[in-house]
Image (cartoon, rainbow, N blue to C red):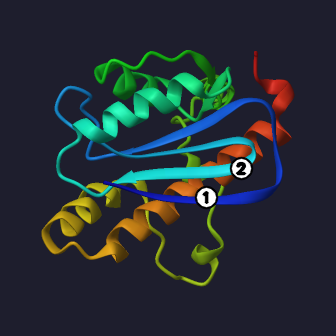
Amino acid sequence: MITSYSRELMLGIPRGTLIDLETTGLDVNRDEIVLFGYIQGSRLEIICRNSEDETPFTVQLAELVSTLPRPFYAYNLSFEKGFLQAKGIHIEGVDLFQPWKEKAEALYLKWPKLDELFSHAEHYFNEPVISGRDVPLLWQKFLHTRDDSYLQQILRHNESDLLRELYLLVYYRDSYKV
């Protein structure tokens, strides 16, 4: 079974697909994909597992990815690429992280996380924000309780990541080698 969410955006990507995954951890050989979000054209779509069994989700994901327009864009593409490859899904694309990584290295700074490049409005008001680090715990809470509010928090986090990545892609488009 899959939970999905979609919405029409006021702007979009004329070519290609922006993707973002949420996972149970960082190890491609041990951890699992929980959610796949993407923007194609002006449509934001998110599909999320709601079953402990990852296989049906992976099968659906493989079918979906094969239909999405190229190139793929992602912030830290090697993360998405590694997890998808571990499931037998091969992608190539443009890493939205690369120019920021290079700039940080040239200035002897640590590599920036997406949250460090673009803050959430909630931070200003000292309100809580779900981060990628929260996803594994939220997923475990969902599996234990079947309370959809935990999945909704993961979806909301992914939507925020996709929208901030879209800003990077649109505003800094000349920084990326397509």
Residue that protrudes farthest toward the left in the picture? 144
Drawn side of residue 95 relative to residue 134, left or right: right
Amino acid type, residue under disc 1 in the picture:
Ser
Q: Nearer the viewer, residue 140 or 176?
A: 140
Task: Locate residue 64 relative to residue 102 in the image: left or right.
Answer: left
Vertical comparison of 123 with 168: above or below: below
- Residue at x 58%, y 26% (from the top left corner): 67
Mark 2 and mark 1 in contact? Answer it, CB < 8 Å.
Answer: yes
The C terminus - image quarter: top right
Amino acid under label 2?
A: Arg
Up/down of 36 relative to 105, above or below: below
SS category of the residue bearing label 2: strand
Q: Quadrant of residue 69?
A: top right
In which quadrant is the N terminus drawn?
bottom left
Question: In the picture, residue 122 is in which quadrant?
Answer: bottom right
Looking at the rendering, which quadrant does residue 99 occupy?
top right
Q: Residue at x 51, y 28 (%)?
A: 65
Above or below residue 71? Residue 18 is below
**Disc 1 on helix, strand or loop?**
strand
Q: Which mark is residue 96?
A: none
Residue 80 picture location, percent across and down: 45, 30
